[in-house]
Image: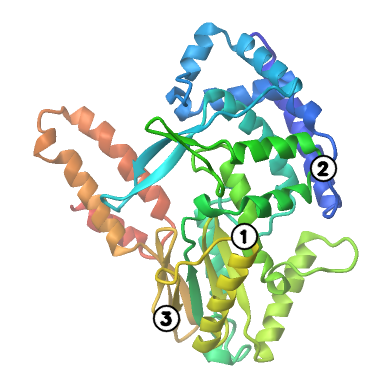
């Protein structure tokens, strides 16, 4: 495109900064007009660049159009038409094309993916660019999934620090272990079952521009096309949409809001982030000392854990109360079979890592993040498949090109784990 890329990016960044600062300063107010920004040619060009440089650009939606075909016909022509449709309110999202992809590590199980058209992806990207700074300013520090600058490693480090034993004698409950129990949360079909009415109400609390709100509602109700059959979407945010992770975070932030006293308490006047975190930490400590059951959540998208300072009976009661709360607010259900209560000393798995508390004479209970044995077995299996008899005709260079991304990605993901070097050494000998 014959346009100034850097000027577009600078303008978009300025808009996002303005929205973020306003949202921080006015947590209970609504932004009333963002349609002009959404339909601005600079915003649409920015969204197009995001979509066209994504690996999924070669994947077509129900209209059969790909990024490559649009480029051949002319990008500016495509964006001018899209801008005209939006400004005249003639734009309507198309149904997503359903595609089943196999679940990692679960043979025979598939996850439904809804693939929007390229045109819908561009509009969704523009909407996300405007909504994200508004809600990012309001999301709490215990939420990590699908957020800029946050990762699985950050979530694990948060759990590790929160569960670390205090100095001996400072907290006598449960031998100095702040949280002896953990609720491993599992939501039934989370992305497919989020209540649309609840989600739209949360959106309206921060966005008063009805054209933007209506557009998000149209995306939610666009439906799915599977094997030439149309299915209505009465609930959920289709996995595969650019805006879906943000909408899911808006809905699922209700989980941490249940534990507001211990995560993000209200303080009088304008308070800094550090003062809020210090107040939350102080309340958790004093409530534990007073013998009260304290709950502390950490969430990564729809995967979450709740650390519990009380007894096993109190953890069981909290699990039931949380299930009822989620059902009443978000319309989501906790899976009774998969939502487990585990002793921290027995260990639990979260985001592919194994988390366990170990006793140390000098420091008390220490939190350790380990590599699960099943993950090592899976890597060995993948290496065996790449180097087996079926690949005997492949050259050494081809095999290395196939193996290196697998090994590098696996090592980077688990490199911070306790005893990672020993596991890596054992795998080197495989």
Number of the front mark, 3 or 2: 2
Identify the element where label 2 is drawn.
loop
Q: Residue at x 59, y 12 (%)?
A: 75
- Among the two numbered marks 1 and 3 on one chain, the one whose residue lies closer to the N terminus: 1
Query: From the viewer's perspective, is 253 left or right of 58?
Result: right
Q: Residue at x 37, y 44 (%)?
A: 409
Residue 265 lies, in percent from the top left, at: 77, 70
To which residue does mark 3 refer? 345
Looking at the image, which is closer to me, 331 or 144?
Answer: 331
Q: Is any part of residue 352 visible from this angle?
A: yes
- Among the two numbered marks 3 and 2 on one chain, the one whose residue lies closer to the N terminus: 2
Q: Please, which colouring scheme is shown? A: rainbow
To which residue does mark 2 refer? 208
Identify the element where label 1 is drawn.
loop
Looking at the image, which is closer to me, 368 or 96?
Answer: 96
The outermost residue toward the right is: 269
Q: Is any part of residue 148 visible from this angle?
A: no
Residue 330: mark in rendering: 1
Residue 405: mark in rendering: none
CA neighbours of label 2 inside 10 A, class few (<14), some (14 to 19), many (20+): some
How far is mark 1 from mark 3, CA to CA? 32 Å
Q: Quadrant of residue 13?
A: top right
Residue 186 lies, in percent from the top left, at: 47, 64
Looking at the image, which is closer to me, 39 or 155?
Answer: 39
Q: Are marks 3 and 2 in contact (CB under 8 Å)?
A: no
Residue 339 lies, in percent from the top left, at: 45, 70
């Amino acid at each position: 495109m014959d346009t100034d890329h850097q000027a577009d990016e600078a303008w978009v960044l300025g808009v996002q900064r303005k929205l973020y600062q306003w949202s921080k300063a006015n947590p209970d107010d609504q932004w009333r007009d963002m349609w002009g920004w959404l339909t601005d040619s600079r915003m649409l060009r920015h969204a197009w660049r995001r979509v066209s440089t994504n690996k999924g650009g070669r994947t077509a939606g129900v209209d059969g159009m790909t990024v490559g075909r649009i480029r051949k016909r002319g990008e500016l022509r495509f964006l001018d038409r899209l801008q005209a449709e939006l400004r005249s309110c003639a734009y309507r999202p198309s149904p997503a094309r359903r595609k089943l992809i196999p679940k990692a590590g679960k043979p025979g199980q598939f996850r439904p993916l809804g693939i929007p058209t390229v045109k819908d992806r561009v509009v969704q990207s523009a909407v996300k660019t405007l909504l994200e700074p508004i809600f990012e300013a309001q999301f709490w520090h215990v939420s990590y999934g699908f957020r800029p600058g946050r990762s699985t490693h950050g979530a694990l480090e948060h759990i590790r620090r929160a569960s670390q034993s205090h100095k001996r004698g400072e907290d006598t409950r449960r031998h100095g272990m702040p949280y002896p129990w953990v609720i491993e949360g599992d939501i039934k079909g989370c992305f497919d079952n989020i209540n649309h009415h609840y989600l739209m109400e949360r959106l309206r609390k921060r966005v008063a521009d009805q054209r933007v709100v209506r557009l998000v509602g149209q995306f939610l109700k666009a439906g799915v096309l599977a094997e030439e059959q149309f299915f209505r979407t009465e609930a959920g945010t289709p996995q595969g949409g650019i805006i879906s992770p943000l909408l899911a975070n808006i809905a699922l932030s209700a989980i941490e809001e249940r534990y507001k006293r211990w995560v993000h308490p209200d303080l009088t006047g304008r308070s800094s982030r550090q003062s809020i975190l210090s107040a939350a930490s102080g309340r958790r400590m004093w409530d534990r000392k007073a013998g009260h059951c304290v709950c502390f959540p950490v969430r990564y998208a729809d995967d979450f854990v709740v650390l519990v300072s009380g007894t096993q009976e109190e953890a069981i009661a909290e699990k039931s109360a949380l299930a009822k709360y989620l059902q009443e607010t978000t319309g989501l259900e906790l899976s009774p079979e998969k939502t487990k209560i585990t002793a921290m000393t027995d260990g639990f798995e979260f985001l592919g890592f194994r988390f366990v508390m170990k006793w140390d004479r000098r420091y008390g209970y220490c939190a350790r993040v380990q590599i699960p044995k099943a993950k090592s077995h899976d890597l060995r299996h993948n290496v065996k498949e790449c180097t087996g008899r079926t690949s005997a005709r492949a050259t050494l260079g081809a095999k290395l090109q196939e193996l290196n991304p697998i090994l590098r990605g696996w090592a980077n993901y688990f490199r911070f784990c306790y005893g990672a070097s020993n596991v890596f050494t054992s795998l080197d000998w495989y």
